[in-house]
Image: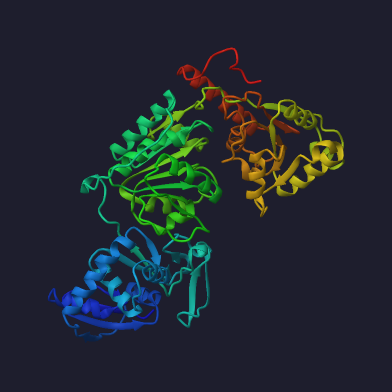
Amino acid sequence: METSVYTLTRDPTRRFSIAPDVDALYWDRRGEAVTVLETHSSVGQAFRHLRSGKGAPGDRLPPPPVSLWERWERAAHSLRSLLAGRVLLWDEVKGLVRELAGPMGDRELRAVLQTMCLTGMAFMLPGVEIPSAVSRWRCNRCGSGPEGLFRSRCGRCGGECVSCDRCLFLGRSRACTPLFFFLPEEKGEASGDFRRVDLRLPALTEGQKWVSDRCLEAVRSGQRFFLVWAVTGSGKTEAVLPAVHRVLEGGGRVLWVSPRRDVVEELAPRLDRAFPDLPVNVLHGESGWVRTSSPLTAATAHQAWRFYRCFQLVVVDEVDAFPLKGDPQLRAGVERAAAERGTILWLTATPPRDLRRRLARGQFPGVILPVRHHGRPLPEPRLFRLWRLWSSLDQGRPLPPVAAFLERVVEHGGQGLLFVPRVADVDRLLSWIRRRHPDRFGECRGVSGRDGERKKILEELRRGDIRFLITTTVLERGVTLPRCHVLVFGADHPVFDAPSLVQIAGRVGRTADYRFGEVWFLSAERTEGQLKAIREIRWMNRVARRRGWLKEDEENGCQ
């Protein structure tokens, strides 16, 4: 896209523009004249020239008729409600405006967008910034450094161009293409923009009410970060919804971030039921654009890169899970989506060790919810050791703990999840069952993150068509079965660290009317991860008991 670099009569600061006539008219109304230094074929080249500070004196640009400014400004204000709070490439802006606001020529749209930049409604950067030092190359949308960028011949600008592979699924971010950051409109309690929102919730338990009150206080006080450390199956979603309700009624917007698309799709109906008057924007890799004006959005973590400072509340579910875990660019995108004075609630059952320590010492704001909604204790895992576990599996020798687990599940009319560390292990364990327990093989299926039929298999599992599902850690979160038992096969493998084992154990005992579910860790040797997971589960049960939140009766024990 053709982009000009210019200076003003009394200000030598270099600026750049995709519609220099707009700048000439804007500054002429303020007693300044625009001198164009250079015109480049791409935004990236212009931005690089802007930063270099080099260039010969140019020609003064005469302003167009004053009447054009009113037209551009009027169009800018009409588009603001459509674009506010978004981060969009040029092609995305064109597509969105064409679909939702009507046809507009490229020249006119460039003038309107430049007007928005000059009047503080937006600002513009190249999609990829390429200073002279390659080590400083950076995608301005996702924040990736040079390792995620590559140079190739570009059909758009006609030269060698740098683009980003990391956020390619959102549309290609290039050095030659402008990236627009549209500032949010002023909304929320400060503007008096209140709305009536109906919230429908089941009665909260004492523990959930306690967490809910703390979250409401964090939102009221403008706390930037707040941690909710809640055991799996505790109903933390319901506990957080009153804070969501308060922000929505105050005229604000809420973003609920989940780690995976299937989790987002499961969450959206729950939010629909809780807020029947509000449609929920669902945003993930296959959903397309957010086209409604609903203030409530459920999205995967990567979709947060599409927003800029527009959510008064951001709820990050399973903040320790992939892909958020260990990814500073994704976390930065989530924080960028939150309003400057907004609150970010982190929800997790397994926070990192440093965060736990800071929370325990009062150095980080947050709460602990150690009990499930039904008040029953968390099932404590049982350890089983079997020497030469994997060779016995491959050679088809007896594996008594596995055989006992299969019979235990059938005896109690349950369903079993058998976790293995690697994708190849799914077929290995299925082959062993077919060889040693052919009567059970027909009730078994296998699934992994590479399985294209995962969604279909999960639906069959929830219907009860599958009794035993052999899976990798892809199902350690987000799966709820009412009559669940769990066996972790090869629990000494490094992939099964303490947080992973806690999450896996959390698949069991999530409903009050089925108390036979068990968690078994089978391995050749015991590891610190297994012992830590058991210690944490026992500690949570002790804390819940100390607070009086457990139901103490003769049926309370885990069988």
Locate the N terminus by quadrant. bottom left
Q: In this view, does 478 lie to the left or right of 185?
A: right
Image quadrant in which you'd find residue 395:
top right
Q: Where is residue 490 in the image (x, y as percent from the top left)?
A: 72, 37
* Residue at left offset 41%, top offset 33%: 201
Q: In this view, does 395 lie to the left or right of 277?
A: right
Seen in the picture, residue 346 relative to 105 is either above or below; the reply is: above
Image-quadrant location for residue 485: top right
Q: Which residue lies furthest to the left in this view?
A: 31
Q: Position of residue 106 (x, y in %)?
A: 35, 78
Q: What is the image's colouring?
A: rainbow
- Residue 304 x, y percent position in the rendering: 43, 54
**Res. 328 visible in picture:** no
Q: Is 408 situated above or below 45?
A: above
In the rendered view, would you say 132 is above or below 415? below
Residue farthest top in this picture: 554
Q: Examine the rendered structure and indicate whether residue 373 appears above or below residue 428.
A: above
Q: Residue at position x 18%, y 74% from top?
A: 70
- In terms of depth relative to the viewer, which is nearer, 149 or 187? 187
Which of the pair 226/445 is nearer the observer? 445
Q: Which residue is drawn at 38% across and 62% down?
A: 87
Q: Where is residue 200 in the image (x, y as percent from the top left)?
A: 40, 36
